[in-house]
Image (cartoon, rainbow, N blue to C red):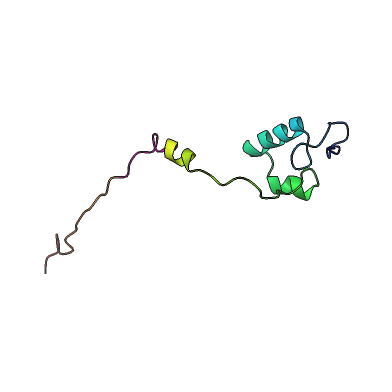
Amino acid sequence: MKKDALRPGSGKEHTRGLSKSDYAIARNLINKGLVTEQQLIDAGKMLPSKGRGKPGSGAREWLLEAVKPKQSEVKFTMDLNEGVDL
């Protein structure tokens, strides 16, 4: 049985001590840069991560290659004596 979320009256705990709606609001605030995850943890508003996420498949990076311009290799040479009168 799930226990109550950290914020009284917000419902049952879903993730990191927060209800589903509170967690969505917290992620939104973090993504907007209004608060950091560590600030929420330090204030007791969110529990720390248990770090049990599944490993990435590499699909995200592979798909994003479509928008990344390929870096062309640029080579140049410079004559250090050019323009110098000896």
Outermost front residue: 1
Tell me the chief SS of the magenta region.
loop
* 81 and 56: which is toward the camera: 56
Location of residue 51 in the rendering, given as x and y in whole percent from the top left corner: 66, 50
Outermost right residue: 8
Task: Tell me the residue at 23%/53% (across/down).
Answer: 75
Location of residue 7 in the rendering, given as x and y in whole percent from the top left corner: 84, 37
Task: Please tell me in which quadrant of the rendered image residue 37 appears.
Answer: top right
Q: Which residues are magenta?
A: 64-71
| Left or right, residue 65 beside residue 42 | left
| Left or right, residue 70 beside residue 85 | right
Task: Tell me the residue at 47%/39% (across/down).
Answer: 59
Q: Is residue 43 above or below residue 82?
A: above
Task: Tell me the residue at 63%/46% (across/down).
Answer: 53
Task: Please tell me in which quadrant of the rendered image residue 9 appears.
Answer: top right
| Left or right, residue 1 beside residue 29 | right
* 63 and 7: which is toward the camera: 63
Outermost bottom residue: 86
Please say whether residue 77 is one of the residues in the magenta stretch: no
| Left or right, residue 12 beside residue 50 | right
How many badges with numbers are in the image?
0
Q: Is residue 74 above or below residue 12?
A: below
The quadrant of the rendering that contains the N terminus is top right
Location of residue 69 in the rendering, given as x and y in whole percent from the top left corner: 35, 38
The quadrant of the rendering that contains the C terminus is bottom left
Task: Tell me the residue at 66%/33% (across/down).
Answer: 28
Location of residue 2 in the rendering, given as x and y in whole percent from the top left corner: 83, 37
